Amino acid sequence: MSRVYNFSAGPAVLPEEVLREAGEEILDYQGTGMSVMEMSHRSKAFEGIIGDAEKALRELMNIPDNYKVLFLQGGASQQFAMIPMNLMKNKVADYINTGQWSKKAISEAKIYGKVNVLASSEDKTFSYIPDLKGLKISDDADYVYICHNNTIYGTKYNNLPEVGEKVLVADMSSDFLSEPVDVTKYGLIFAGAQKNVGPAGVVIVIIREDLITEDVLPGTPTMLRYKTHADNGSLYNTPPAYGIYICGKVFKWVQNKGGLEAMKKINEEKAAILYNYLDSSSMFKGTVVKEDRSLMNVPFVTGSDELDAKFVKEAKAAGFENLKGHRSVGGMRASIYNAMPTEGVKALVEFMKKFEEENK
Ligand SMILES: *Cc1c(COP(=O)(O)O)cnc(C)c1O
């Protein structure tokens, strides 16, 4: 068996310790004589699994009691619809456009109401976060929406828009648990698991209780109401049980690393190894303005499509997988999520140096 360094943007690398533990429990979860995959979601054992997962997440993120934690399905993309269906009481919302995931959220919200795009970085291929000073939040907006880390373009918010009394909604799919978050600043945070916390099939929603109401847009299906899932502890129907089990293990892994402060420090040090090299290289260049660089997704180019392709091919042969950039940006992208070991980034940089030397 040999494992590669997997720089995929998602589904992405998971901590090896978590995979090993899950492997050990695959036939017999803690004396139950069955796999978590085979277990009733109404069983005592699964109650323990989902309860422990929620508890660990609450501790990690310091989630206040007036917020619910939901484990849902449909991916982050389902939230693009679920959010307006549940929160658009006035049928108006403000969005900031920082890339393809916010664009998709905007298109979806337009099905349900009026969308004001307060700011956009589309003019420069989303290589920066728009200036948040002087943003004019709409008086009648039901919420203000941001994509906190832009997986494809490699930008992140280091500051939040001033939304006053308005509800701030954030897509944290690609930087969930990468650093501490002040949950109280948000009305709703959501994250697809497959970037930083688990296998595909689970989306985590952290929502303030006063936003969970019966007053949803007409026609909202039962399964797409936050209230349905909040009232049933995410067990209204069969949840993505195995995925929740793995997420729970990843939460504990992050706790064992020292929590989100420690995770942030590790992530900053890890990202700096790659960014420092990019800043010093005469071949490879980062594509994002320095102030807004993501700690999780690092896009870079050589400036030549041919050389980019050669690099991706040779990197793959050397055991560095999934470095090809998103088709809308080109070049390369290294996703260096929580579970990517520092040695993986160091090894990548060594490989890049060698490639630069050989292809001068
Ligand atoms: C991957 C991703 C999505 C889409 O996730 P799905 O689970 O495939 O729907 C949405 N937002 C961000 C920021 C992402 O990185």
Image: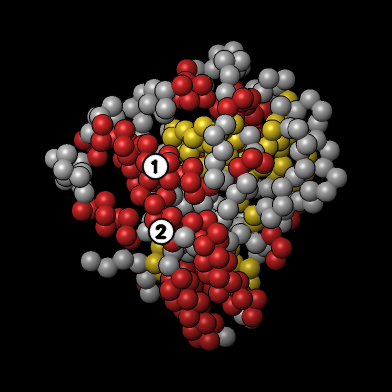
Residue at 63% x, 34% y: name it.
187
Query: Where is 294 relative to 77, above or below?
Result: below
Residue 256 shows which numbered tag?
Answer: 2
Q: SS class of the residue under badge 1?
A: helix
Q: SS class of the residue under badge 2?
A: helix
| Outermost right residue | 134
Query: Where is 11 relative to 77, above or below?
Result: below
Q: Mark 2 belongs to which amino acid?
A: Asn
Query: Where is 348 relative to 223, above or below?
Result: below
Q: Where residue 237 sits: x, y (%)? A: 36, 23
Q: Where residue 186 sits: x, y (%)? A: 64, 39
Q: Which residue is disc 1 drawn over?
A: 53
Q: In which quarter of the image is the C terminus?
A: bottom right
> In front: 49, or 246?
49
**Badge 1 local density, few (<14 within 10 Å), some, or many (20+)?**
many
> In front: 145, or 254?
254
Residue at 23% x, 53% y: name it.
23
